Amino acid sequence: MKKHTMTTLWDEIPDDADDLLVVRGGFRRYLCLCGKHLPDRDAAELHAMETNQCTTCLGTTTEQITPNFSQPCTSCAATGKRKAQLSWELAYAEAEALITVELVRKLITPLTGPFRLSEVADAVRATLDLPVGRLPVGPRVRDVLRGLEAGGELVLVSAPDELLRGTTVVLYRDPYWQHAAK
Ligand SMILES: [Zn+2]
Ligand SMILES: [Zn+2]
């Protein structure tokens, strides 16, 4: 079986580069072990799909976010496999249907101080009687809380765990929020 391990080749990133473009796949090319040159992110994702590999980490099991920062791929549970990525997507869709904004709102309404993502995720699991690992509860709850934050109901109060590019591209592992002052 032919190996399709893709290596990321970074271009020079100018200081004033668009940060979102950097984290979303810009400023890089890819070289596959099979000899294929992949000039951009789209070409690399297509080749990953053709070779049954995860399109987020391109089969490498780690997601390269900036030249200096990578993390285990969450899309495929760090397996690098397209099949695992697809089942993750299905599980996420199931979590999305089950864990509604209303449910999360009901659980956080009584909380007066700051609360952590992991605490809310635990409360959701307890309410729905979901064993740990059954569904991607944390990622879904994070998306709901970020949505409430964007809508002005919540304020993010924790400091980022990692600064990936200055203070514009940052990473939170277990962030905490509190209700916005009324
Ligand atoms: Zn290849
Ligand atoms: Zn992956």
Image: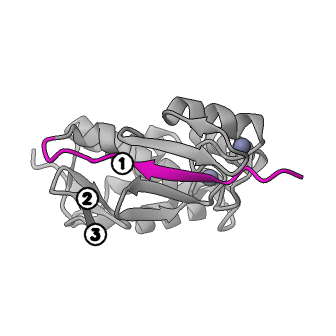
> Does the stretch in magenta take in 15?
yes
Q: Are marks 1 and 2 in contact (CB under 8 Å)?
A: yes
68 up-or-down from 1: above or below: below
Q: Secondary structure at mark 3?
A: loop
- Label 3, label 1: how far apart the Cα atoms are: 18 Å
Q: Which label belongs to residue 161?
A: 3
Residue, disc 1: 145
Q: Secondary structure at mark 2?
A: strand
Residue in the picture at 41% in, 43% down: 28
Magenta segment's dominant SS is loop
> Does the stretch in magenta take in 161?
no
Classed neighbour count for the residue bearing mark 1: other residues with Cα under 10 Å, few (<14), some (14–19), many (≥20): many
Residue in the picture at 15% in, 56% down: 167
Q: Amino acid at mark 2?
A: Trp
Instruction: Give the x, y percent position of residue 138.
Output: 51, 58
Instruction: Give the x, y percent position of residue 22.
Output: 32, 43
Report whether residue 97 is seen.
Answer: no
Upstream in sequence: badge 1 or badge 2 = 1
Report whether residue 104 is seen.
Answer: yes
Instruction: Give the x, y percent position of residue 108.
Output: 35, 55
Residue, disc 2: 177
**Magenta residues?**
1-16
* Label 1 CB sits under 8 Å from any ligand 2 atom: no
Residue 51, picture quadrant = top right
Q: Secondary structure at mark 1?
A: helix
- Label 2, label 3: how far apart the Cα atoms are: 15 Å
